[in-house]
Image: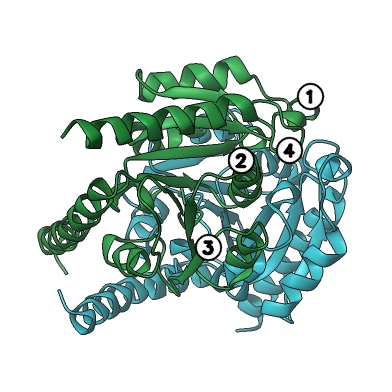
Chain colours: A green, B cyan
Amino acid sequence: MSQDRLIEIEADVLTKNDAYAQANRNLLAGLGAFAVNLVSSPGSGKTTLLCKTIDALGAQPLAVIEGDQQTENDADRLRATGAPAIQVNTGKGCHLDGHMVGHALEHLALPRGAMRFIENVGNLVCPAAFELGEDCKVAILSVTEGEDKPLKYPDMFTASRLAILNKTDLAPHCDVDLDLYEANLRRVNPGIEILRLSARTGEGMAAWIGWLRSNLAQKTEVKAAE
Amino acid sequence: MSQDRLIEIEADVLTKNDAYAQANRNLLAGLGAFAVNLVSSPGSGKTTLLCKTIDALGAQPLAVIEGDQQTENDADRLRATGAPAIQVNTGKGCHLDGHMVGHALEHLALPRGAMRFIENVGNLVCPAAFELGEDCKVAILSVTEGEDKPLKYPDMFTASRLAILNKTDLAPHCDVDLDLYEANLRRVNPGIEILRLSARTGEGMAAWIGWLRSNLAQKTEVKAAE
């Protein structure tokens, strides 16, 4: 197959995805719901962070869409917090797409102003290209991954509004320079917001919860002003 | 685009890839070269392990093909060991393919019986589907990623001959059960070989070097017997 034909097919797939994503975006906007697409490598600690986030958000209505190649494990962990969670198994697929998320949203009947967390398949490459209708992407990085990751996988960090440097409790045990990590994130995306966090010790959790509440409030205000 | 059409396109891409991979396999077999495809999440420590492996292999002739979305950083690190290394930047691409590796092999003129290390793009999903003509895949897992990863990304571990549980020096600082990690690897691939290793402390390096030398010797013997 020629390179031109491959590019044409890719453009076709992305165009169709964007239409599904736009439909999701319209649905969420109508509900005044703030939706976050959590993206990362496998093993960055997304699910643990999400479980602790749900606990910390207390009575805030929310739901989770959980993407993995296989298993219901993550949805089960999230449901144990009391939150509604839908597992999407992508099989051979390497990312969630707008169509999958649209179907999941149909099954999540929630009050106005509820938050939606979408936990994408652990993959620093492919999910960067697929809009899901989310308000923003939040990239989670484990500090153990190394400071060069933003430079080597720039698309994901260019596409993200916030980067969370997670597992900071492990930083003293690794040869990692967190200031350089942040500098490299800003090299690929000068406007990116950054939080240092340890889901294990709770460091940075208050700032993250504040960030979520503030973004939800802005979304709700925009809807109320319309 | 219909699901049937997408599957047809994917099958077409994989068929073309397999032809390139077979050409690489024939080339490597003719040279009695043992080629390893190193696959993992971003940040599992592949490049550090590879640098220490090259040091430990001493006078063994070898070369490295290095895959990343962006930057020459990893090839630069490897060249600092004295080994020839070719960087392949995949741009938007999420994996190396047989065609890219074929071109890289053309540029690596090496003596008979040399080892080839192919460091794939950090991605636990897509590289599983693309044969490169390698003798085997070796999956590197950082112990910080969590014991559930083999179950959630089974294709990669089904496709790998050996799994290396890397960064074992961090295990005492994480809530990780290495026996469960191994049990989950064997659940998805009962025949998989497993080594525990810390590239940082050197734990397990001797076993890994022994594994490489033994596999190279088997390949060379097969060639000599023909």
Report crowding for label 3: few under 14, some 14 to 19, many 20 or more residues within 10 A (C-alpha). some
Tell me what residue is drawn at x 31 percent, y 61 percent: A97
Q: What separation in Å lies between label 4 and label 1 (alpha carbons)? A: 26 Å
Q: Chain of mark 3?
A: A
Residue A84 — which label? 3
Q: What separation in Å lies between label 4 and label 3 (alpha carbons)? A: 51 Å
Q: Are marks 3 and 2 in contact (CB under 8 Å)?
A: no
| Residue B202 shown left or right of residue B67 in the figure | right
Residue highlighted by disc 4: B55
Report crowding for label 1: few under 14, some 14 to 19, many 20 or more residues within 10 A (C-alpha). few
Q: What separation in Å lies between label 1 and label 2 (alpha carbons)? A: 21 Å
- Residue B197 location in percent, x, y? 81, 50
Residue highlighted by disc 2: B47
Viewer-nearest residue: A150 or A48: A48
Q: Are marks 1 and 3 in contact (CB under 8 Å)?
A: no
| Residue B58 shown left or right of residue A217 in the figure | right
Give, as a three-letter code, the residue at label 3.
Answer: Pro
Tell me what residue is drawn at x 73 percent, y 79 percent: B187
Q: Do callouts 1 and 3 point to residues on the same chain? A: yes
Q: Chain of mark 1?
A: A
Relative to A110, say whether A182 is above or below.
above
Q: Is residue B66 visible?
A: no
Give, as a three-letter code, the residue at label 1.
Answer: Pro
Q: Do callouts 4 and 1 point to residues on the same chain? A: no
